[in-house]
Amino acid sequence: MALMRRQSLVKFDAPLCETIVDTPKPQGNEVLVRIERCGLCHSDLHIQDGYADLGGGKKLDTTRGMTLPFTLGHEIAGVVEEVGPDASKDLIGTKKAVFPWIGCGKCRDCLAGDENLCAKNRFLGVSIDGGFATHVLVPDAKYLLDYDPLPVNVAATLMCSGITAYGALKRLVDRPRQRNILLIGLGGVGMMGLSFAQAMFTQKISVADLSPAARDTALQNGASFAYDPSEPDVVKRIIKETEGGFDAVVDFAGNDKSMNFAVATVARGGKIVVSGLMGGNFSLPMVQWIYKRMTIEGFMVGTLEEAKELMALARAGKIKPTPMKEEPMGEVQKWIDELRAGKVVGRIMLKN
Ligand SMILES: [Zn+2]
Ligand SMILES: [Zn+2]
């Protein structure tokens, strides 16, 4: 029996640790993928913690239904190594990106194609074992996407940071009065969002981030304006320079500070899409919400259909690459620590 290596969560709120087990044998329609790359995402940190921050010292327990050891990682691309008896043998040896937002396949949300909303989901690296390993077992071949001629790193990142950024931006398409767009938070998802926004919109794209390095990178990668939210009177300056604020805002950070900045800089009749999960609590005076006629929409990951749309855009060469850095899979914990410390610009891609 072949063995697989995993960087496992063996205890919540503790460093990952290598475990070695038998490589699973695919059953039915299952497919075993040998992992070439897995991206490190901020949500991996929350799962490792075992809770999400609700603000005011309150925590949401996210350990329910998870059995340890558990394998994190959901931005996966690799090569099909083995298939179950009901899957096509032709898949063996093909290079694929793995769509991780897999539902139960039976509920109202799944039947409507919204597997990302499934309450009984089988999200890879979130609910069932994921990609910080040499292999991953995928429930069905329909979750595998061709990515040629894209680089393997790009293919992997499209599956989480990519689809999150794309899905959030899609919620701002077809708004005729939209003059401008602001992207808040330039982590891995925000940087991808900046790249996609230039393919999806004709309007100028502005960005905001506390990090000067992230702002510089954004300006070199097509942002028209970059704002430091901690600059005194920056909101006043934005309202003046934009003649009333931004008609569309995406908050890729998702904490009280970023949302306060979004609400302060959104124009009357504007829309804010929130997809960041930094956590905490944010409050909004009712009259401000109503006087501004603002819309606030929460968004997380995306559907298989959206993943295919995004993959098609990328394969057609419509998307500029975003900053990425390859590191050995065995060093994932070191990079988790760096990400927690806010020392990572762009995406860390773990390599087997
Ligand atoms: Zn993610
Ligand atoms: Zn379902």
Image (tube, rainbow, N blue to C red):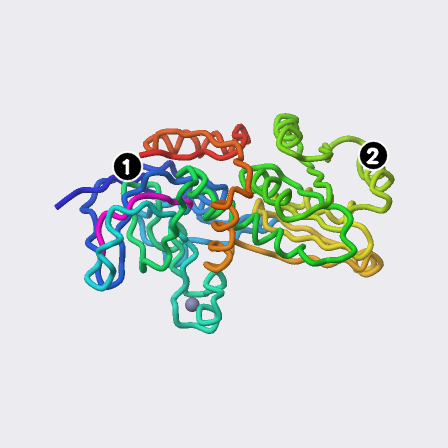
Q: Relative to residue 352, is residue 177 depicted above or below?
A: below
Q: Is residue 250 left or right of residue 155?
A: right
Q: Position of residue 157 (x, y in %)?
A: 46, 42
* Magenta region, main secondary structure: strand
- At a point 52% along the width and 30% down the height, the residue shown is 344
Of 279 and 36, nearer the camera is: 36
Q: Relative to residue 335, is residue 13 depicted above or below?
A: below
| Residue carrying label 1 | 18
Q: Is residue 242 left or right of residue 20?
A: right
Of 310 and 114, nearer the camera is: 310
Specify the segment rendered in magenta. Answer: 75-83
- At a point 21% along the width and 59% down the height, the residue shown is 84
Quick one: which residue is furthest to the front in this view? 316
**The label number, if any, that marks residue 233 in the structure image:** 2
10 Å crowding of disc 2: few (<14), some (14-19), many (20+): few
Can residue 122 be found in the magenta stretch?
Answer: no
Of 327 and 119, nearer the camera is: 327
